[in-house]
Image (spheres, rainbow, N blue to C red):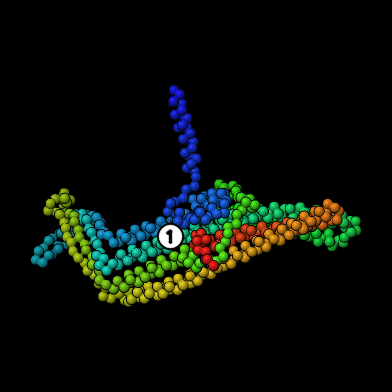
Amino acid sequence: MKNLKILLILIFLMLIIVPAQAKQPTIDANKLEYINLDWWKKFNDEKLNNYLLLLYENNKDLKIATASTKQAQQVVKMAFANQLPQLTISASGGREFSSSTIKFGDVVIPDYAQSRFLLPLSMTYEIDIWGENYLKTKSVKQKLEMIKQDERASYISITSAFASNYFNLIKADKLINNQEKLVSIQEKIVELYKKKHEGGLCPLSDLLNQKQLLTIYKEDLNKLKETQDVLENQLKVILGDRNLVDIERSNYENLKIIELPNDINTDAIRNRPDLIKVESYINKIGLDVKVARREFLPKFIIYGQVGFNAYDFSKLFSGHSFLSNAGLLPSFDVFSGGRKIAMLKYQKYEYEKALQIYEKTILTSIQEVNDAMMSSKVADKNFKTSIERFNLEQDKYNLSEKKYEIGALSKLEKLEAQEAVILSEKASISNKIDTIVSAINVYKSIGGVDYTAYEESI
């Protein structure tokens, strides 16, 4: 009895644990090549990593891109099917009722009427002597590679957009906290100016200026809250989870800045989906040109039938009703109105266009990498400069506190010094997030790979 109880408890625990495990996000093994999870782990943000896993599972745009890839795979199968023999069963049965007299030479059949039942298995196969159908299949495979790169580009773009919005949301949280402190301090400053004005120690214009500054701070706070709300809504849409109530995020203080390289080798652009896609496009058009040339050559089709042919349904499967035939059908278009020549020229022009698109894509890719690198360098310099300015303001505030303690500084001057510290911190907050986002932009510009592998040794 005791062993039975233990067994029942174990079964109960398994029923509880298994469903819980089934809810964990899963990633298609075929999509791991699109997801550089090791790079994202460098941010040391577990919440971000968990959201990325949820994104890969639920995002609607990624599902659409995956469905397009699966459709293209079926198109490849359809193209390959054209290289194989085609078998069909086309049964027929009918009766010609009494009609006018029919003559076959000297033979006269009055009031002709006849039934016929046909049950053949037909086969047709185009002998691919020139390899035309094979080239068509290869062309469709190149189209599949293009669509795969579109899917990969979606993964890179959507992941980067989510991560950028995630870090901007953390920036909004920190700036809101910062702005609330500014509003609180400015309200105290306004109260002190009121007392100074009532005591005749400052003009009304000074009081009005401080009140105006307070309204500006409040407006900025409202805009930051709006930005926070918009970013949260965007992240929920990207995650594709309608039941998601709140976006959990890390604290600003725990964010890690990734070390940026001084320069990146231009070979890094070879991983970009758009460049790989154009290369596949060139290969596809090259194959299409070959197909257009082979259209001028004759085609040879083997055909045959095996089945039954009878004029009485009861004798359809008898031995004497057996039907079989086979043959070779050569065909050659003597005149097609110039259609084939026009198609060949069209494909050649398309190939020239593809080469120009390839060159333009290379130039655009290099530009985007250089722009991303320049933005990252500027963001990094601005962040370091803003930290230096913040530290100076902090030192000045510490000095003002000491002066305030010995009575050498008024409370108003101390509050203004504190306000200057918060304002300088505001710049450092923005610059820190800009540095992180710029690293994501560099990652995106080189095709979603770890750019440290392409850092140039200088």
The image shows residue 1, relative to residue 119, as above or below, that is above
Residue for point 26% across, 75% down:
334
Residue sitting at x 86%, y 61%: 204
Element marked by disc 1 = helix
Please state, as top left, top right, bottom left or bottom right, where the N terminus lies in the image: top left
Residue beneath the point at 68% across and 55% down: 175
Q: Position of residue 45 (x, y in %)?
A: 57, 51
Question: Badge 1 is on which residue?
Answer: 148
The residue closer to the viewer here, 100 or 386, is 386
- Residue occupying image coordinates x 84% and y 62%: 205
In the displayed structure, 337 sits above or below 190; it is below
Tell whether 232 sits left or right of 304.
Answer: right
Q: What x and y, as percent, mark residue 368? A: 54, 67
Is residue 225 visible to us here? no
Please give the count of numbered marks on the rendered protein.
1
> Percent position (x, y) of residue 23?
49, 43
Please tell me how crowded label 1 is: few (under 14), some (14-19), or many (20+) other residues with Cα within 10 Å.
many
Asked where in the image residue 385 lies, by quadrant, the reply is bottom right
The amino acid type found where label 1 is placed reads Lys
Residue 185 in the image, given as x and y percentages of width and height:
77, 54
Quadrant housing the C terminus: bottom right
Q: Is residue 12 something one can see in this rendering?
A: yes
Q: Residue furthest front?
A: 458
Note whether 14 is above or below 143 in the view shown: above
